[in-house]
Amino acid sequence: MISKKEQYFNNLNAYDKKIRLEALRELKLLCDTRALDIPITGKNVNNHIHTTFSFSPYSPSMAVFKSWVSGLATTGIMDHDSVGGAEEFLDAGEIIGIPVTVGFEIRCKMNDTPFEGKRINNPDQNSVAYLAMHGIPRQSLVEAERFLAPYREKRNIRNWKMVDKLNAQLKPNELGLDFNTDVLPLSQYSFGGSVTERHILYGLAAKLTDREMPRHFLLGMFKSQLVEKFYVDADEELPHITDFIALAEKLGAIPAYAYLGDVSVSVTGDKKSQKFEDAYLDELIEYLAKTGIRAVTYMPARNTDKQLSRIKDLCEKHELFQISGEDINSPLQKFICDKIETPEFKHLIDSAWALIGHEIASKDGLENGMFSAETIKKMPKLDERIAHFATLAKEKHSKKRKV
């Protein structure tokens, strides 16, 4: 017979959102009453946690709990083509008492730009870039969902085609996948989640083993070696970069480019050695800054010191906000990136707090956001704005903890 603690922990990934949040409340109560050890929170931050609303073993409630017990000071949700888990993530942050930030990740067309035809930061397709929408104010989530829903529907049409293409290379009677029974149930599509190539590959891994950890090992191997064999180019499911930037303005959010960099050894094991945007990075960052991208998000654990130094210098040159977070979508990954607490990257901690401050300020009106025309007029320098919004968030959090 399992204990109440184990039951609550299991319920963090229950089908019903109400059960998940109630389990989180019970676990927090156990900590508050010393029935469970209270986690020791450090300075570390992570703005790039995927949940079951794209691909992840963690529901939004579970993701917040894992962030807290891992010792994160702040945490952020970042799902592909989806804000379906954002409300739950925000509620979970309130329950636990950890500051959170909200965003989503999406692939955008780079057609009719100087980078059409180039392999940018998408391992599978040219003329396509991964972009991240950070710091979405809560009142803008409905508008974000209205924008994303049609793209998810179109993506599922392509997912179905990819399953068919994969099946043509497998032995249908032994390993063949049925999209409706083997892939779709792995997602939160009915609740506003997306279905990705990872769902297809995890469905294949599930045919080979009934144990979770080996499935994720297989998934990483399949992601690096198998996707190209069944991948179908995306088109209608991708907005243009200019549409993405226009949406950010409407939402009062912060549009960011996700720097990948040339890969030699993949720390997550799901990318093969490959050339990306490093050969023309100076030109790309200059173009993005002029087009309306406000930030660059990167992951210190994934890149070399030379790559990191270069992207930092380019961000400073073009006054682009630097955001970081380890791309968490597997139980094999740590929520903590130790490198962020080193002197070279401690500015990323203030960036996370500034994101939270931006969302707090935007609740009273989008004109109060970090990159609004009104705020830029009052505080033209990016460093000044980062310091202001980070202080706002820390003071707000400190007051909550004293209540």
Image: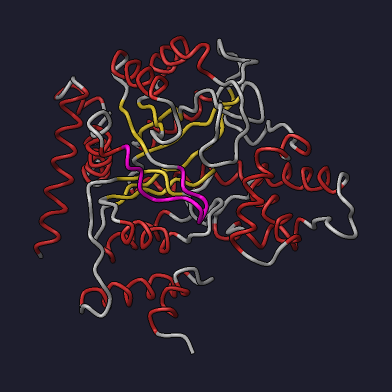
Which residue: 18% across, 29% down?
A: 385
Colour mode of the rendering: secondary structure
Q: Nearer the viewer, residue 165 or 341?
A: 341
Nearer the observer, 286 or 42: 42
- Could you tell me residue 389's position as x and y percent? 18, 37
Q: With respect to residue 177, does 3 lie above or below?
A: below
Q: In the image, which residues are magenta?
A: 327-339
Is 366 situated left or right of 278 in this image?
Answer: left
Q: Position of residue 75 (x, y in %)?
A: 33, 50
- The residue shown at (42%, 21%) is 307
Residue 88 as seen in the image, left or right of residue 94: right
Give how far across and how far down residue 193 sits, in percent.
56, 53
Q: Quadrant of the C terminus?
A: bottom left
Q: Is residue 337 magenta-colored?
A: yes
| Rendering quarter of residue 6 | bottom left
Nearer to the camera, 401 or 302: 302
Residue 257's place in the image compared with 337, above or below, is above
Q: Main secondary structure of the magenta part?
A: loop
Name the residue rendered at 41%, 34% in the picture.
299
Q: Residue furthest bottom?
A: 1
Q: Is residue 348 magenta?
A: no
Q: Is residue 57 above or below residue 292?
A: below
- Residue 7, given in percent of the width and then of the height, sits at 44, 80
